[in-house]
Amino acid sequence: NHARTVTSLRSTKLKEEQIQISKEKDEDNGALLMDPLSSISTTATTEGTAAVSAMEEGGWANSLLWRGVVVILCALWASNFAAAKVIMAEPGVDSALYALTRFSVAALALLPGSINAVRRGAIDKETAWGAAKCGSWVAFGYLGQTLGLLSTTASKSCVICSMHCVFVAIVAEYMRNQKALDAGVADTSFDTKRLLPAAVAVAGVAIIELQGAAGAPTVGDALSFAQPIGFGLGYLLLEDLMRQRPQAALPVSAIKLCVVATASFLFFELSPFILHGESVFPPRIPDFAPILNSPSALGGVLYTGLITTALALWVESIAFKRVPATDASIILTTEPLFAAAAGAVTLGETFVTSDYVGASLIIGACILAVSIEDEASDESCDPYDDSGCVPPRTWPEGFE
């Protein structure tokens, strides 16, 4: 009787386990039907992580490979400037419509994977708010870029954009100084060496503006300076966010792009007044027909939205964790050279000797800024220490 009772209990337990497994399968199938994009994104993320883990075993060849990936990312970002000029040259496609379409496409591309990350608890409210503030500065940089390209060349805009490395170095030193002052540290003097790269960069910009092939300075040049300010401050905010929540890279990137898309929509609504002094009432409904009817504009929007924005952000979050920050910084200083090449091929823009000299000074200033920061950093410094020490620079995930 005891043996029969044990057998009966085992049989009952086995049936319960089979029922539970059946329920879990039904739930999984239901989830797949309700949210197929999230399921696809989860599978792609898992496969991508496995591929990265396998590649990490490649030693020096793998290290060289990831540096090559950063070079490719640099070339992709540089191509944005020429692509934007080509798109906005199409009939009916102005800067406001281009910005709205590009960043809406990019945000939608990252949305499925971001929703899945939120469901896993990868981000909290504080991080989301920080991502929104970061996105507002990035939007400031992108809108300055878009408006500036209306009256300046792609290569000159990119050269001005590259000054973000100098801007970041100066602001980071100021923040370190303030942090040490608040902590009561006696030595809170500003490191004047941080101003040397800025002086070199200003000299480079002056040469390009006054002697370059693009002619005299324009309003677009002034608007382009929103790039180093917006992207630089966005970088500093993002670095702090990623130190606290490194697993929130994808939703943070999506939130940033949603903020940029929202800012682009506001710019679209206000553009009649900003660009032409016309009334903004009644509110406009975006007409995407000029983009949809133009193969060049449609291809350009898909390229800048999906490839150089959404995809580049995802690849960047992987590559920049495997390349030393100093190396990545130096590689990215070559962006103006790629932008000049893209402008020459697609737009017929030219670079004269003074342009090369000015660009070389700006690139040299960026390398100098990185070297000074790398020399001043302390490997043992805790980023959350209030002593005012300088932690080694790290590349945050999802930085544009």
Image: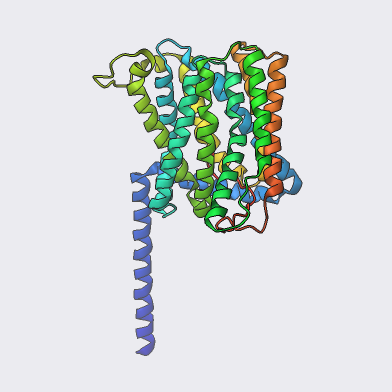
Residue 388, compared with residue 102, is above or below; it is: below
Seen in the image, is 54 located left or right of residue 230? right
Residue 49, compared with residue 93, is above or below; it is: below
Residue 264: quadrant of the picture: top left
Report whether residue 334 is seen.
no
> Which quarter of the rendered picture does the C terminus lie within?
top right
Q: Nearer the viewer, residue 116 or 215?
A: 215
Residue drawn 49% across the image and 30% down it: 141
Seen in the image, is 279 located left or right of residue 209? left
Residue 351, compared with residue 60, is above or below; it is: above
Residue 308, compared with residue 319, is above or below; it is: above
Report whether residue 219 is seen.
yes
Q: Nearer the viewer, residue 73 or 350?
A: 350
Residue drawn 64% across the image and 26% down it: 202
The single residue placed furthest to the left in the displayed view is: 282
Q: Position of residue 59 (x, y in %)?
A: 74, 49
Residue 364: quadrant of the picture: top right
